Amino acid sequence: MRITTGKYRNRKLHMPQGIRPTQDKVRKAVFDILGDISGLTFLELFAGSGAVGFEALSRGAAALTLVEANRDSILAIKRNIALLNATECIIYHLEAEKVIKLLSLDKKSFDIVFIDPPYNKDMGKKILQTLEGYDILAPCGLIIVQHSRLEELSKDSLKFDLIKEAKYGDTWLSIFRKKE
């Protein structure tokens, strides 16, 4: 797995065993959709290796928060932080729902929240519901959920509007914006 663009371009990342990494074409699509992210804050839930978050840093994100519960993935993330000398990173070794609650208590907010949970377990839907209850998305912030085509995400939300869906084989991206 390599960083595709920006200041870390072509740097190889350490990958933990047993994860489903976000494919290069899907990562490229995410950042094509986002456009210029310079100076924005980025939260990656279910980070795995942190590849999407590190891509965000490489493209100019001001700060990165990575959330991962798996020990092997945390070790890979720490190795990747050291490899990139990415000092603008914070790591949480906890379940995503717990971290969302902690971030809310600390009054943290993020411009972009990227969610890539294990497929076919309805985790994307569950995390979206958790995010509705805890205000950690900045005004005009975006949530991007990477999920299987077999998983249906709710389009009816009190706090978020579904603004785009993109399909890449079995992988779908659903992009939500915070309602004004």
Image: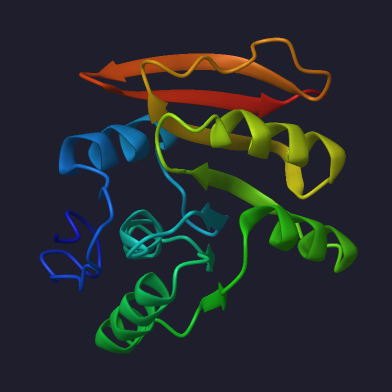
Residue 85 in view: yes
Above or below 9: residue 32 = above
Relative to 93, is 38 on the left or the right?
left
Q: Residue at x 58, y 46 (%)?
A: 113
Q: How many marks?
A: 0
Quarter of the figure with the C terminus: top right
Quadrant for the N terminus in the image: bottom left
Quarter occupied by residue 137: top right
Q: Examine the rendering and report whether any part of residue 40 can be seen.
A: no
Q: Position of residue 132 (x, y in %)?
A: 80, 34
Name the one closer to the observer, 94 or 23. Answer: 94
Rendered image coloring scheme: rainbow
- Where is residue 163? Give x, y as percent: 56, 15
Question: Residue at image x 70%, y 52%?
Answer: 97
How far from the left and from the top, in percent, is residue 172?
36, 22
The image shows residue 31 at horizontal and vertical percentages of 34, 40
Along the viewing direction, whichever of 30 and 67 lies nearer the viewer: 67
Locate residue 140: give its quadrant. Answer: top right
The reply, left or right, for residue 97 in relation to residue 22 is right
Q: Which residue: 29% across, 79% down? A: 80
Specify the farthest residue to the top: 156
Q: Nearer the viewer, residue 118 or 176?
A: 118
Image: 70 above or below 100: below
